[in-house]
Image: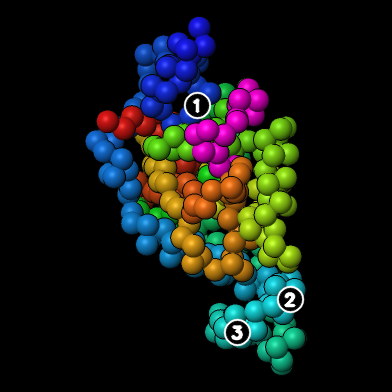
Amino acid sequence: MLGALRRRWDAYKYRFVPWLALNLRRKRRTLRYVPESSQDKIISDEDVFETLLKIFKALFINDFSRQAHILALLPDIRCKYLELLTVEQKRSKVKSCNHQSQHVFSPEEVLFNTLGFSITRDRSSLVSAGTGVFVTKGFVPKGTVVSMYPGTVYRKHEPIFFQSLGNPFIFRCIDGILIDGNDKGLSRSVYRSCSRRDQLGPFQMSDESWLTAALQNPLAVGQYVNNCSHDKAANVCYQEFDVPGYFPVELKQYLPNIVYSHDIESNLRCVVLVTLRDIKQGEELFSNYYTIVN
C-alpha cells in the first residue's frame, strides 16, 4: 500500500500537492501545459532579478532610519544608499551619515511609487473561494512580476508530511522542490524557526512579516491567488527563480522564503507570479493550479 502511494505521489505533476484526492477526479479542470521545463518562464531571470532589486531597494530606502544597525557594518553600502535617498526623496535633507529626515510611505505606497501598481488581499470574487488577491491601484503591464509565493522551501528528501496535512498552500516546483506557503499552525512555526536560525547578527536572511497582517514586502501574498475557472481565465503564471549568490545581503530581509535545511549549498528557490496580460485596477489575480510539464 505504501509503495502504491509513493508511486502515485511521484507521478503527480500538478502544481499543488494536497489536491490529489480532491481534484484528480474532477472533470471541469483548467489545465496549463508546458512542453518542456525550460519553457516554463514568461520573462527572463534577469528581469525577475532586476524587478526584485528595484522594489527591495525602494523598501530599504523608505525604511532607512530602521537600517542603522545594518549600515553601521557596511559603510560603503551606507553611502550608496544615502545617495539614492537624496535622489529619490528630493525633500529629504541629509545633514550627515547619521541623520536625515524623510517621509515614510507604507509598503503598498512604495510598491505603487516604484512599479506603478499596488495589490492587496481581500475576499475573492469567486463563490466560496475565500481570500483572493486584487490590483487595488494602478496598472500592471503584461510580463510584470506582480507577486511572490512565500514559504519554507523543502527539497525532495526533506520531511513535510505533518506540515502538509490539511494544508492547501504547498506549491510544487517542476524539479520536485516544495514551498509551504501556509501562514498558520506548524508551517508558521517551522518558517519562523528556520528564519531565526539563519539570521547573521543584524542581517535577516528572510522576511517573516508575511506571517502577519503587516507586510514588510507587499508582494508576498502569492499564496492567496486563486485558481482560474472556465469563466475567469488565468491572468498570472508561476515562474521559478533561484536567487543568485550575489544578491545584496542587506536586501535579503525582504525575501519571503527560507530553506528548511541549509546543510547543502544551493541558491534559494523563490517563485514569482508574472502577468500573462495587462491587468487593470480592481481586477483579481487568477493563476493555474494545474500545470502539466511534458
Check disc 3 and report the residue beneath it.
Answer: 76
Q: Nearer the viewer, residue 168 or 203?
A: 203
Type of the residue with mark 3: Asp
Q: Is residue 276 left or right of residue 76?
A: left
Q: Nearer the viewer, residue 189 or 245?
A: 245
Q: Earlier in the sequence, mark 1 or mark 2?
A: 1
- Label 1's element? helix
Q: Label 3: few (<14), some or many (≥20) within 10 Å? A: few
* Residue 72 percent across, percent down from the top left: 72, 79
The verdict on residue 188 being magenta is no
Q: Earlier in the sequence, mark 1 or mark 3?
A: 1
Check disc 2 and report the residue beneath it.
Answer: 68
Q: Earlier in the sequence, mark 3 or mark 2?
A: 2
The total of numbered circles placed on residues is 3
* Residue 273 percent across, percent down from the top left: 44, 47
Q: Is residue 75 above or below residue 246?
A: below
* Residue 164 percent across, percent down from the top left: 60, 26
- Measured in 3D between alpha carbons, the distance from the residue under mark 3 to the one under mark 2, in whole angstroms, is 13 Å
Residue for point 65% across, 84% down: 75
* Residue 121 percent across, percent down from the top left: 60, 43
Type of the residue with mark 1: Val
Q: Are marks 1 and 3 in contact (CB under 8 Å)?
A: no
Residue 228: name its quadrant. Answer: top left
Residue for point 63% across, 58% down: 205
Res 137 visible: no
Type of the residue with mark 2: Ala
Check disc 1 and report the residue beneath it.
Answer: 17
Q: Residue furthest left?
A: 35
Question: Which segment is the magenta one?
Answer: 151-165
Q: Is residue 200 above or below residue 84?
A: above
Q: Residue furthest top?
A: 1
